[in-house]
Amino acid sequence: MTVRNPRIPKAPAVRTSIRTRLMRQDTLFATGIVIVLTLLSFVMARSALQQRVLAQLSGILFARETLLEQALQSAREEAALLGSRSELVRIAQGGELQGTLEAMLINMRDEHMPAQAIAVFDRTGTLRGSVGTSMEAPFDATQATILQPITGDEGWKAYRVFAPIRSDDGKNVGAVGIEFDVVSLLQPLLSATSLGETGEILLAMEKNNAIILLHHRYSAADRRIILLGSLDDQYAFDLPLAQALKGETGIRSAEDYAGKKVFSAYRLIPVLGWGLEVKVDRTEALRSVTTLAVSMGVAGALLTMLAVFVTRLLALRLTQPLIRLSGRVSLLRPGNWSFRSSVRSGDEVEVLDRVVEDLAARLKMTYDHLEDEVTKRTAELREQYVKDRAILESIEHGVVAVDRRGKILDINPSVERLLGVEREMILGESVSQAISFCIHRKPCPAKKHPVMQALEKREPIRAATNMHMNIVRADRGLLPVNVAVTPLLVGRKLLGAVLVFQDMTDDRRIDYIKSEFISLASHQLRTPISTLRWYIELLSDGKNKNLTQVQRESIVEMQTAATRMADLVEALLHAARLEGGSITPKLKKVNITALLTNIAEELRALGKDAKISCAIDIPTKPVMIMTDAILVHIVLQNLFSNAVKYSHPNGQVNVKVRVRNGWVEIEVTDRGIGIPTPEQHRIFERLFRARNATTVDTDGNGLGLFISHMIVDILGGKISFKSMENKGSAFTVRLPMGTKKSGVPSPASS
Ligand code: ADP
């Protein structure tokens, strides 16, 4: 026999290959690095560039301010120089020096001073001579050098410098004013070529709280003054020019008057009270960084792609042997355990390959061994099964196996023979329906079915031989049986039960014949024994004086023997009648306490003879029960006499009566010889006497308890006992108080 190949599960499909995982992880990693590096570089470069631009703006601002101040300073110096010239002293003092001022103007232009007018004033500030645009002297022009910017609709047009004219003796005799063209100053001042397309340099002043742009570079079309709004409002909005006009200096990122984001450097030019701002568009300034970031991103993407490509190549090289190996491993199955290691890469894959070779060899060995073992075991099991089956089939008794719910799993041929059923018909049926029992010819309800009880209690059930159990055969006839049910337990788990029943037809028939015979014999013996007793009575009569002492003693012996014989015949007759079902209880209201008191008297008398003390505990109140007084009397008398009979000399017998839940309980206890445990289960059998009883009392007949049991049964009560050898026994009879229907024993089936 060969082991059937187990179903080999298919090799599981690869959900995510190592290659894909490597590539996925590598792509993620490379992309992450590129993004982080690009962002980092961008932020750092941007910050560095921003610093640089701001520093550059600051430098330009400083240079332009210096340029402006230098221009104004040289204008001041020029005016002061002219103020010391003697020609001008004379003009200021009223002299007329025709051509002097023109010559001076030309001279200044030659020296690249952008002067466009010269005027001379006397001490009172009255104009004494001029060339170029006319001008008026400011109030204290004769005292100090004054700078006067000229602004108009076109912004900053020109600036004038006034200086006192001093005579040789150091007296101020008038003032000279020079007007300079501003264009030549503004050009270098506002030139923002080094700041790219968006760079701007702005010069602004404040007038009536309005910010006025002093050059018209941005309004070339209408050449009008440009107002940048209210100084206070713009200051509140952090406009750099407004802050410069308020005397603040700064370099920062800001928004210009047009709302554009710019980098700006600004400060106040104290000489003029004007604000100067150098600014550049932020986007423009940072363009190089943005371009750098884009380039880095592109380079990073290319690098990532390259990395992925390289990873793919590497992964291919790494996983190829693994894929081949897993393909070969998936071919391993019973019958094909051959596997030869073939990878020579020197890495972990080679190790794995060798391990698989080793494993395959071991699997082959184990499998072969297992196959042999299974073959051997199967043969053994089959042999055992055949043996068991043969044993089961040869058993005379009926054997029924059921599962834990009572469904019939198997039966032996004896069941078919004894019950007249077909195996196929009852397999799978519920045992309580397929095999129904009768006790004393009364149908046994399903829950009292011995199999169901054994399953429920998980205990073996053995029906007592005197229970008169029958199984209803298929033809509705009754089969007298003895029954034993054993639950099948593995640990605490219930698997089912096995019912074994023995055909008792012959035993019951013999019992029946025996009872019939005993009944007949005892009936026939009754009359002669009575006659015998009557004549013995006559003989023993005290009037008969002709008898010797020996004859009298013989007569007494005969009398005892005759009485015993009469008792035995009476008992046999009772037993036969009870078995034959010819005794029907005559139920009446009986005062059980009165009945017991009477019997107790008999017990006392009995005890007195045997020197046994009796303690009788009977309720004083009358207890009425529906029962047959004569039958109860027989039972109690038997129990009392047994208690006295089997007590040790000077022993004690107790009788206790209790009323409980509609039952009367009568308990008779002694401290006598007791019943040996191994014999206790037979105590209610007919003619049974325990081993120890026969030595104590040789006269017993073993019918008393048999009769008592049957009587209690037909009265609807229960009799039970507890006993221990040499310690004593306690017999309890429970009788129903009401009219509980009593069972009538059925005759043995025959
Ligand atoms: P017997 O005539 O032998 O007493 P019974 O049927 O009354 O017959 O009792 C059957 C057997 O039960 C007795 O032989 C004895 O072995 C045992 N038996 C009954 N009652 C007692 C008892 N109180 N103490 C010890 N054994 C008893």
Image (cartoon, grey):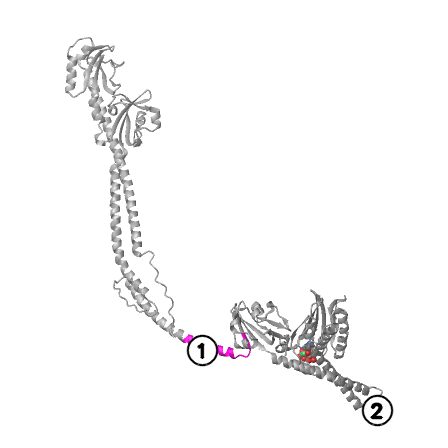
**Is there any visible trace of residue 699 in the rendered image?**
no
Residue at 77 percent across and 74 percent down: it is: 601
Mark identifier at residue 48 = none
Whether ligand 1 has any atom under 8 Å from the Cβ at mark 2 is answered as no
Looking at this view, is 144 or 223 the one in front? 223
* Kind of residue at badge 1: Glu
In which quadrant of the rendered view does residue 565 lie? bottom right
* Kind of residue at badge 2: Asn
- Which quadrant of the figure contains the C terminus? bottom right
How many callouts does the rendering have?
2
Q: Earlier in the sequence, mark 1 or mark 2?
A: 1
**Is there any visible trace of residue 605 in the rendered image?**
yes
Predominant secondary structure in magenta?
A: helix
Judge whether residue 23 is colored magenta.
Answer: no
In which quadrant of the rendered view does residue 356 lie? bottom left
Looking at this view, is 624 or 132 the one in front? 624
Q: Nearer the viewer, mark 1 or mark 2?
A: 1
The spot of residue 386 in percent (x, y) is: 46, 77
Q: Secondary structure at mark 2?
A: loop
The boundaries of the magenta stretch are 376-399
Q: Secondary structure at mark 1?
A: helix
Residue 154 to residue 436: above or below: above
The spot of residue 737 in percent (x, y) is: 71, 67
Residue 219 to residue 559: above or below: above
Looking at this view, is 701 or 519 the one in front? 519
Mark identifier at residue 546 = 2
Judge whether residue 395 is colored magenta.
Answer: yes
- Which quadrant of the figure contains the N terminus? bottom left
Q: Which residue is mark 1?
A: 383
Ligand number 1: quarter of image: bottom right
